[in-house]
Amino acid sequence: MDAELAGEIIIRMDHISRDWSLKRESSCVDHFVHGTLSKDEYEDIEECFNDVLSKVDSCVSSLDDSVDSAIGGLESLTEALEQCR
């Protein structure tokens, strides 16, 4: 794997990690502090976050098999994370 490609993967993983953390924290605050999310809404959002996290693990594992597949997986994870609302 060349340095440019490795850098791209690292940047995408950093963005996904950052976004996942910020969105998850926001949903916790909305539910537990502000009370703007019901228990059911909060649980649905948490399930979505857990699903994305599971896909991150799969994507990282796929780096051993195919870099192109991993990059495609990272793109779909960014989109999937946007659906966690």
Image (cartoon, grey):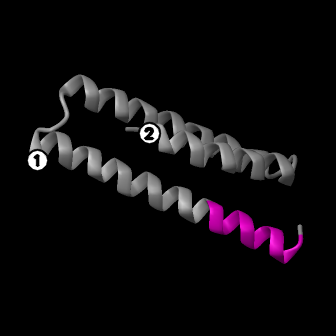
- Residue 4 placement (x, y as % from top left): 82, 75
Residue 25's disc number:
none
- Magenta range is 2-12
Quarter that holds the N terminus: bottom right
- Residue 11 position, x and y percent, is 64, 68
Q: Is residue 85 left or right of residue 70?
A: left
**Residue 20 relative to residue 59: left or right:** left
If the image is split into quadrants, where does the C terminus sit? top left
For marks 1 and 2 on the same chain, the one whose residue lies earlier in the sequence: 1
Relative to 10, 20 lies left or right: left
Q: Residue furthest top?
A: 40
* Vertical arrangement, residue 31 with respect to residue 7, above or below: above
Q: Quadrant of residue 36?
A: top left
Q: Quadrant of residue 45?
A: top left
Categorize mark 2 by other alpha carbons within 10 Å: few (<14), some (14-19), many (20+): many
Give the residue at mark 1: 33
At label 2, which amino acid type do we have?
Phe
Which residue bears the numbered disc 2?
Answer: 49
